Amino acid sequence: MMLALAVSPVCAEPERQDGTLTAIVQPEPVILTAAVSSAAPTGVVSGTIFDGLVDYDRDLKPIPALATAWETARDGLSLTLHLRSGVSWHDGQPFTAADVKWTLENVWTKIHPRDQISFGPDHLW
């Protein structure tokens, strides 16, 4: 059996910073928050709905998002995050360090399937 592929040349277009990307995600995500699912379709969608503490540039280096700056302690055991001001939840309540703490202590260690392994009691505390 022989398989032949026809490949057409790709025309280089200038990079754009605006516009709309329409994509089909299959299978359809069963839930929209990655906090409770590690399924790839959920990850594709949730990243466009929820803000994280950092984003990543094209070289996968962290860039500010909800955290505007951060410092790692000299001993490497703690991280200080400076949170963006003026951020509110959908109900109007302000986003605070207590929210980040709750997420770390609950979502990362108890709820998210993959993070339970990475950040669970045997590894984090």
Image (spheres, grey):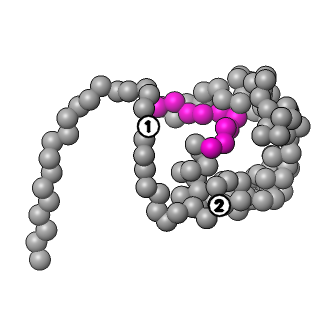
Crowding near the residue tagged with mark 2, few <14, some 14–19, many ≥20 C-alpha atoms within 10 Å: some
Magenta-drawn stretch, dominant element (helix, strand or loop): loop
Type of residue at label 1?
Thr
Q: Is residue 76 visible?
A: yes
Give the residue displayed 23% in from the left and 31% down from the top. 12
| Comes first in the chain, label 2 or label 1 | 1
Outermost residue to the bottom: 1
* Corner quadrant of residue 19: top left
The magenta segment: 49-59
Does the magenta portion include 53?
Answer: yes
- Residue 83 lies, in percent from the top left, at 78, 26
Residue pointed to by mark 2? 31
Give the residue displayed 68% in from the left and 38% down from the top. 52
- Residue 64 lies, in percent from the top left, at 65, 26
Q: Are marks 2 and 1 in contact (CB under 8 Å)?
A: no
Quarter of the rendering occupied by the N terminus: bottom left
* Label 2 to label 1: alpha-carbon separation: 23 Å
Crowding near the residue tagged with mark 1, few <14, some 14–19, many ≥20 C-alpha atoms within 10 Å: few
* Corner quadrant of residue 110: bottom right
Q: Is residue 61 left or right of residue 34?
A: left
- Residue 71 lies, in percent from the top left, at 74, 24
Relative to 113, does residue 71 appear above or below in the rendering? above
Does the magenta portion include 61?
Answer: no
Q: Nearer the viewer, residue 26 or 110?
A: 26
Q: Is residue 73 visible?
A: no
SS assignment at label 2: loop
SS assignment at label 1: loop
Type of residue at label 2?
Ile
Residue pointed to by mark 1? 20
